[in-house]
Image (cartoon, rainbow, N blue to C red):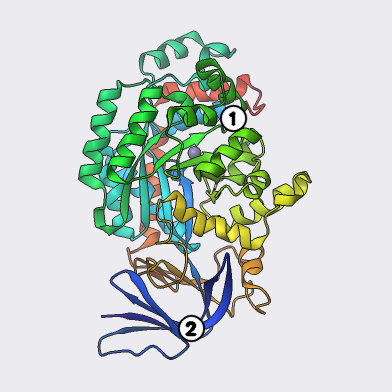
Amino acid sequence: MKTIIRDCRALLPDGEGLRLEAADIVIEDGAITAVAAANAAAAGPGDKIIAGAERLAAPGMVNAHSHSLSIFQKGTSDRFGHVSLLWMNQADVFGRPDDELYAGAVLGALEMIASGVTSVIDHFPEQNCRTEMVAPVAHAYADVGLRAVVGMRIWDRTYDDLDLSQLEGIDDDILAAVGENDPFKPRPLDEIAAMCEETIAKWHGHGGLVSIFPAPSNPTRCTDELLVKAHDIAEKHDLGVHTHLQESRIQVDVSMKYNAKPIVAHMEDLGVLSRRWSLAHTVWVNDDEIALLAERQAVPVHNPESNAKLRVGTSPLPKMLAAGVPVALGADGSSTNDNQNLFDAMSMAVLIPRILGTDEAGWPGAPEAFAMATRNGAKAMLMDGRLGAIAPGQRADIVLYDLASPSLAPLNDPLQQLVFCERGESVRTVLIEGNVVYEDGTFAFGDAAEVARQANEMRQKQLGRNETLYRLAGQLAAAQGKAMT
Ligand SMILES: [Zn+2]
């Protein structure tokens, strides 16, 4: 049985860019099997026909860096800086039961799908990963029908970039209590490697949608042995490796302390830098590191809203693009953004370099921003050539936009209007792996309002937990005068 999207206006690959063409899109077994002229694809009995007239068909977008655990924290962190925010995150997420892990992933997945996102890399969880914690999120993504990488957050070194001993204004009893129950406590390498293998064996491929990647929290929080082990595991199972990289300035100092060189150069020395890595943020990298990223085709994930809100610095995005680095796009967690909407991220990726006024040669426009959100996102998922375009052989992750909506009418230039006008209000139908997961405001998963009701109840429970960590986060924010530390 086939699905045919009949007589739509499709954005089809055209060299490095896209062209708009009236077309029929034929889908079988989760893949696009043909793109035919409009009204030319033959339908057999039982085939599903989706009317495409008045619809723009575009590849679904990849949110290449997010955190499902912080979906509950939207609207909680204005004027926080990186250190106080990460400690607030610990207070917010420590001790979450399975039903809250599940609900957070569902809520984020619904938000993403309704705004044209069909894949996510979920850097999970906030604390050290255990195999049993993956079950609720893997179920959530399979139940909603969102394509997802669950990145197992691992580290075996201390978080030197969040060192509390260097900060003033924190009560001693809090420091002692946090020290005894340190959420950032490292684990031994063997234990981490065994956990990765067990999780991959159990959950990789779940529902045909879920992948498992090893996901170092940050290379500066990992020993060389763990970085090599993570890369070896990825090679063995043909997986990607996801991580945060050089988000804040202090992380450069940490790399210099341990490695006497910047972290990208150090990863190259270790022999691990490759296309398998997706690197959230990649703000503090120098020109030599950018050249290495281009040579190895590693995939930085630009999170312009998070970087701006936390004031960690500005990504050298134009330089990376000019050098041929395949940069993807992410929303980051909802404690730092606070939405999972890639239309915002695309427009900010385009506009911030123009505000800064530097490196004009690499300024992205709408086509480059859309490529970051689709084709380069597929590279971050390690699905290059199989995801991110409407073409035979690609997975059928397609978004149908209403051409009669105010954002898209009149249709002058679909890419400029997707980047600068659209925010998700024109999304009418979303297919992932060929399945219709969203249509005219209704999710195949079920009642979104019920999920929201549960989220409100769960949020109240969360605020009643982890009193010591909340006190610490509050004192950190106060001690820094909310000075964005
Ligand atoms: Zn992040």
Q: Is residue 290 left or right of residue 182?
A: right
> x and y percent of residue 239 in the render?
34, 45
Mark seen at residue 23:
2
> Which secondary structure, mark 2?
strand
Identified at 55% across, 81% down, the residue is 21
- Residue 454 visible, this orientation: no
Task: Return the residue found at the far right.
Answer: 357
* Number of numbered discs overlaid on the protein picture: 2
Q: In terms of depth relative to the viewer, which is nearer, 138 or 375?
A: 375
> x and y percent of residue 466 in the render?
39, 26
**Label 1 sits on what residue type?**
Ser
Quadrant containing the N terminus in the rendered view? bottom left
> Which secondary structure, mark 1?
loop
Label 2 C-beta lies within 8 Å of the nearest ligand 1 atom: no
Identified at 36% across, 18% down, the residue is 181
Quadrant containing the C terminus in the rendered view? top right
Q: In terms of depth relative to the viewer, which is nearer, 467 or 312?
A: 312
Identified at 30% across, 80% down, the residue is 2
Q: Residues within 10 Å of mark 2 (few under 14, many from 20)?
A: many
**Label 2 sits on what residue type?**
Ala
Mark seen at residue 248:
1
